[in-house]
Image (cartoon, helix red, strand yellow):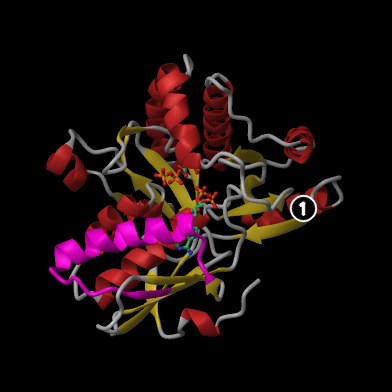
Amino acid sequence: MTVTATAHPNIALVKYWGKRDEAQHLPVTSSLSLTLDIFPTTTTVTVPGDLAFDVVTLGGEPAPDAVAGKVTAFLDLVRERAGDRRRALVETVNSGPMGAGLASSAAGFAALAVASASAYGLKLDRRGLSRLARRGSGSAARSIFGGFAVWRRGEGLGTAGDLSSHAEPVSAPALDPALVVAVVDTREKAVSSREAMRRTVETSPFYRPWAESSERDFHDMLAAIDGGDLAAVGEIAERNALGMHATMLGARPPVRYFAPGSMRVLDRVTRLRADGVAAYATMDAGPNVKVLCARGDGATVAEALHGLADVMAVHVAAPGPGAMRTGVPAHTRPVS
Ligand code: ADP
Ligand code: DP6
């Protein structure tokens, strides 16, 4: 059985930062994101029946042990549910950078969830796929859905927590956003988001206050989206992200993802606003900056960021689709 699926990264406007259960990836707070139409991951899962162990390739090469290990741990969950012990061939291709704060883990595990569930014969609806993707990487729960999505924290631990913690789509007919991605560094981060998140929860005195204010941000964000108020959406997103980075700066030892190029982009975004362009920045676990604006302002924002020192590339993204089965095997896709 061979199944191919494609998924896109999502960027949180209200962040997921901190787990209340490490094994099940149950978050402390609810989050809200926008799935993009750039940097898709395509993953093909083949279950041939005669493999002694899982074989994982990434971009046509054997995947590094750390990547392959997480894929096998994820497939073990799928196999357990399917009652099928056969090993798999997983061929995955990211079209964006990995480990640079551009959500490769979200696209990667959403694509893997869709392809592997189908290859092992699991019949899951979107909610079930979201819960499954969450087990690979929390943020992947949201990439199952296109456009805006919320991931509600859910209630409790164990089975109750697992059942109630999944993403769902949010309709936003009055918003027509773009997310302009300013790439300042594509190298893999020194501290993974998983490690940074854990360290922050365990050691940062700023973590609890941020988590409390993030729950308020989440509710304010839903109201802003409902009202089609892009400026409010952007303001909430920017303060939520900067607050998340403040929690990391307070961790012991601290985690800092800001690079000089990130600061230049943040300064430029502030100036754009002073010039009357409604643009708002967000950053994840990496130095690259994403700027939310109206789709009609995408080109203006991109042009403003293009010439900045340290900005290697600028991509204008629009809302993209949810994870889906596709017909083209991953190993035939171009690697970039
Ligand atoms: P990012 O900012 O790119 O999401 P993370 O450190 O959060 O960085 O996640 C990177 C990790 O996500 C990789 O080390 C790997 O474990 C996983 N990952 C990325 N791409 C894929 C993929 N296509 N298939 C499976 N796992 C992937
Ligand atoms: C900063 O989903 O990569 O991008 O669940 O440990 O795999 P794990 O973490 P991950 O963390 C994403 C953190 C973030 C914020 C977000 O996407 O909400």
Observer able to see residue 171: no
In the displayed structure, 260 sits above or below 216; it is: below
Q: Quadrant of residue 323?
A: bottom left
Q: Is mark 1 within 8 Å of ligand 2?
A: no
User: Which residue lies under the disc numbered 1?
Assistant: 300
Whether the magenta-drawn stretch holds residue 4 is answered as no
Badge 1: how crowded within 10 Å, few (<14), some, or many (20+)?
few
Query: In the image, residue 74 lies at what x, y percent?
Result: 31, 58
Judging depth in this view, the residue of 230 and 66 nearest the camera is: 66
Please report the residue visible at 40 percent of the width from the left and 54 percent of the height from the top.
140
Give left or right: position of 289 versus 62: right
Please report the residue visible at 19 percent of the width from the left and 76 percent of the height from the top.
121
Judging depth in this view, the residue of 254 and 264 nearest the camera is: 254
Mark 1 lies on a secondary structure that is helix
Query: In the image, residue 126 lies at what x, y percent?
Result: 26, 62
In the displayed structure, 250 sits above or below 221; it is: above
Judging depth in this view, the residue of 150 and 289 nearest the camera is: 289
Please report the residue visible at 28 percent of the width from the left and 42 percent of the height from the top.
23
Give the amino acid at mark 1. Thr
Give left or right: position of 236 versus 279: left
Range shown magenta: 62-90
Whether the magenta-drawn stretch holds residue 63 is answered as yes
Q: Quadrant of residue 44?
A: bottom left
Observer able to see residue 112: yes
